[in-house]
Amino acid sequence: KILDITNGQLLHTLEGSAGPVAISGNLMAFVVSPDKKATILKITKDTIQPLLTLTQETDQISNVTISGNKLVTVSGQRNKDDMLVPSNTAKVWDLNGQLLHTLVGHTKFIYKIAISDNLVVTGSRDNTVK
């Protein structure tokens, strides 16, 4: 559900099984099952406009964040128990779906990501923040 924080008014309801969600200004990025692709929407009080579904990423996305004109994702693979295990790399995309950077350096999976302006921060199971 998308609510107006100033008055609690329900603006929109999106259907489906949702995963990670991130919002920046009037842009929202989210991951929806079953395909686990990141989708970016432009949201106003009256409308929702799809901007991009990230089909270039072949793995399932386990985490997503958005800021300005950048999207950061962490993908993963299914293990033998059908659990999605995140990778130890993050990818930075523009809002046209162009891969800008692949961020490497963690030795275990990334479970937290944040972005602000031109900075990306990742937290990993290897007990480091980069």
Image: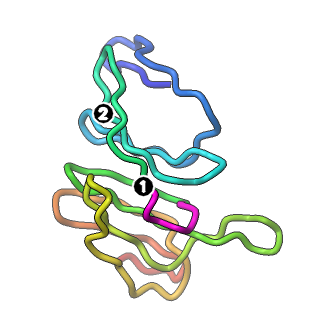
Position above or below: 45 against 109: above
Q: Is residue 58 magenta?
A: yes
Callout 2 environment at 10 Å: few (<14), some (14 to 19), or many (20+)?
some
Q: Position of residue 109 (x, y in %)?
A: 55, 77
Q: Which residues are magenta?
A: 54-61
Q: Is residue 51 above or below residue 54?
A: above
Label 2 sits on residue: 42
Residue 111 at x, y percent in the picture = 52, 66
Quote the CA–CA distance across marks 2 and 1.
15 Å
- Residue 50 figure quarter: top left
Residue that extends furthest to the front in the rendered view of this protein:
55
Mark 2 lies on a secondary structure that is strand
- Looking at the picture, tell me which residue is in the foreground, 73 or 9: 73
Q: Residue at 46% across / 63% down in the picture?
A: 112
Residue named by callout 1: 54
- Prevalent SS, magenta region: loop
Identify which residue is drawn at 53% across, 68% down.
58
Coordinates of residue 42 in the picture (x, y in percent):
30, 33
Image quarter where the C terminus lies is bottom left
Left or right, 23 with reference to 82 = left
